[in-house]
Image (tube, rainbow, N blue to C red):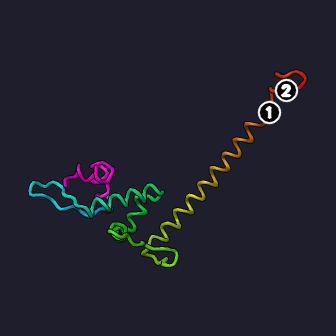
């Protein structure tokens, strides 16, 4: 199928497919005699897997570092790309661990910002006592 049909089947845009190809997440597609990209069921499944992983919070760079393992997620019965039990450098486990640590750090930072803002919002300003007689 052509790029527009493949993109629609994967729930994305032709531009995204070209971007994934440029970033090494998709292997270069077969080309027609006229030079148009041709995609099949396997490529559409891979794009769906990429989109799911991105939606989970992984980055394009995270996926790029393990692009050679993405095919494991696209078969009729997807296999694990790596788990905590199989945490070698070629699995997704180190990538996921780094992303989880980054998310945890971001959550801690945002929680501290929220708590600080909440404290500041509840703190009376210097002019509040003068504005409220008897207070």
Please indicate whether residue 53 sits to the left or right of residue 27 in the image: right
In the figure, residue 79 lies in which quadrant?
Answer: bottom left
In this rendered view, identify the residue nearer to me: 75 or 34. Answer: 75
Q: Is residue 9 magenta?
A: yes
- In screen coordinates, is 79 left or right of 115? left
Residue 63 in picture, x, y percent from top left: 40, 63
Decide: marks 2, 1 in contact (CB < 8 A)? yes
Q: In the rendered image, which quarter contains the N terminus? A: bottom left
Residue at 32% x, 50% y: name it: 12
Q: Residue furthest left?
A: 33
Overall secondary structure of the magenta section: helix
Whole-percent x, y for residue 116 in the image: 71, 45
> Residue drawn at (23%, 62%), measured in percent from left and top?
28
Label 1's element? Answer: loop
Residue 67 at x, y percent in the picture: 35, 67
- Asked if 88 appears above or below 14 in the picture, the reply is below
Examine the structure image and report whether residue 26 is included in the region drawn in magenta: no
Query: Which residues are drawn in magenta?
Result: 1-24
Given residues 122 and 9, the one toward you in this image is 9
- Looking at the image, the residue that sits furthest to the right is 134
Residue 104 lies left or right of residue 88; in this view the side is: right
Q: Which mark is residue 129?
A: 2
Q: CA distance from mark 2 to mark 1?
A: 8 Å
| Element carrying mark 2 | helix
Closer to the chain start, of discs 2 and 1, is: 1
Residue picked out by circle 1: 124
Q: Position of residue 53 (x, y in %)?
A: 42, 60
């Amino acid at each position: 199928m052509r790029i527009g049909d493949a993109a629609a089947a994967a729930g994305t845009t032709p531009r995204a497919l070209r971007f994934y190809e440029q970033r090494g997440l998709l292997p270069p597609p077969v080309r027609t005699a006229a030079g148009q990209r041709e995609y099949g069921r396997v490529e559409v499944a891979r794009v769906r897997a990429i989109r799911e992983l991105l939606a989970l919070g992984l980055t394009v760079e995270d996926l790029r570092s393990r692009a050679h393992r993405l095919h494991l997620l696209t078969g009729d019965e997807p296999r694990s790309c790596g788990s905590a039990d199989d945490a070698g450098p070629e699995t997704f486990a180190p990538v996921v661990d780094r992303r989880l640590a980054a998310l945890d750090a971001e959550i801690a930072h945002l929680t501290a910002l929220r708590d600080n803002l909440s404290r500041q919002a509840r703190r009376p300003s210097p002019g509040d006592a003068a504005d409220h007689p008897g207070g």
